[in-house]
Image: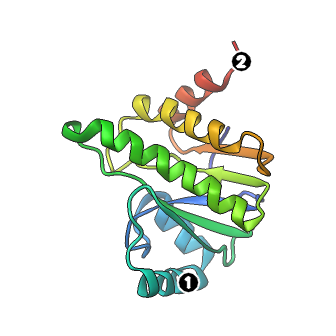
């Protein structure tokens, strides 16, 4: 677990909390697009023109442009509503699992994740953290991923992950 700026990490792949259009936005998505330069947005445009928008729960990869990572995996999480909470839980887990699958396909051994959907998409942080940790733990078991870093941008997420990831 880490705090700070995911765009500065020297890992094989960083995951972007993307929107379906893959065209950048606010938060970590905007930060990754700004720091990575125009190559990332051009690759995203190509992906969308060929395959359409990226569905919630899915992920696609681009190069990392000017970032120290090798790749950016753009994962789309759910926009949370209380009326469909159980479905959103599954979609959030899918976004993380699919990111690990894409990382494996790329040959990545080290991956850094932001907190997907817990910002403007409104997914409750205390609900998301155990879902995320379980999905990632299940996905990396027995595979080529050696190290996963959760980059928590805010103190509440950092505390939640710290409690859940500290051996008891």
Crowdedness of circle 1 by 10 Å Cα count: few (<14), some, many (20+)? some
Q: CA distance from mark 1 to mark 2?
A: 40 Å
Secondary structure of residue under mark 2:
loop
Vertically, is 164 above or below 40?
Answer: above
Q: Residue at x 78, y 59 (%)?
A: 10
Disc with the residue nearer the chain's start (1 vs 2): 1
Mark 1 highlights which residue? 43
Q: Which mark is residue 155?
A: none
Q: Quadrant of the N terminus?
A: top right
Is residue 118 visible to the viewer in this orientation of the structure? no
Secondary structure of residue under mark 1:
helix
Mark 2 highlights which residue? 167
Question: Going by the image, does 86 lie left or right of 166?
Answer: left
| Residue occupying the far left of the picture | 83
Pick whichever, 105 or 71, lies toward us: 105
Q: Position of residue 16 (x, y in %)?
A: 54, 61
Pick whichever, 8 or 59, lies toward us: 59
Q: Position of residue 167 (x, y in %)?
A: 71, 18
Question: Going by the image, does 28 lie left or right of 118?
Answer: right
Q: Residue at x 32, y 42 (%)?
A: 87
Q: Residue at x 48, y 63 (%)?
A: 29
Among the 4 quarters of the image, the one containing residue 55:
bottom left
């Amino acid at each position: 677990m880490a705090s700070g700026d995911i765009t500065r990490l020297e890992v094989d792949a960083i995951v972007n909390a993307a929107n379906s259009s893959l065209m950048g936005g606010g938060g970590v998505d905007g930060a990754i697009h700004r720091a990575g330069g125009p190559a990332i947005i051009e690759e995203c445009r190509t992906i969308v023109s060929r395959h359409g928008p990226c569905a919630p729960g899915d992920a696609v990869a681009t190069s990392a442009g000017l970032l120290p990572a090798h790749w950016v995996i753009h994962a789309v999480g759910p926009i949370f509503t209380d009326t469909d909470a159980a479905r959103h839980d599954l979609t959030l887990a899918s976004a993380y699992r699919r990111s690990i699958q894409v990382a494996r396909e790329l040959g990545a051994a080290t991956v850094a994740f932001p907190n997907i959907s817990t910002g403007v998409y409104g997914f409750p942080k205390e609900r998301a953290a155990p879902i995320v940790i379980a999905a990632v733990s299940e996905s990396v078991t027995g595979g080529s991923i050696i190290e996963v870093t959760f980059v928590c941008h805010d103190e509440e997420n950092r505390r939640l992950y710290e409690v859940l990831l500290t051996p008891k």
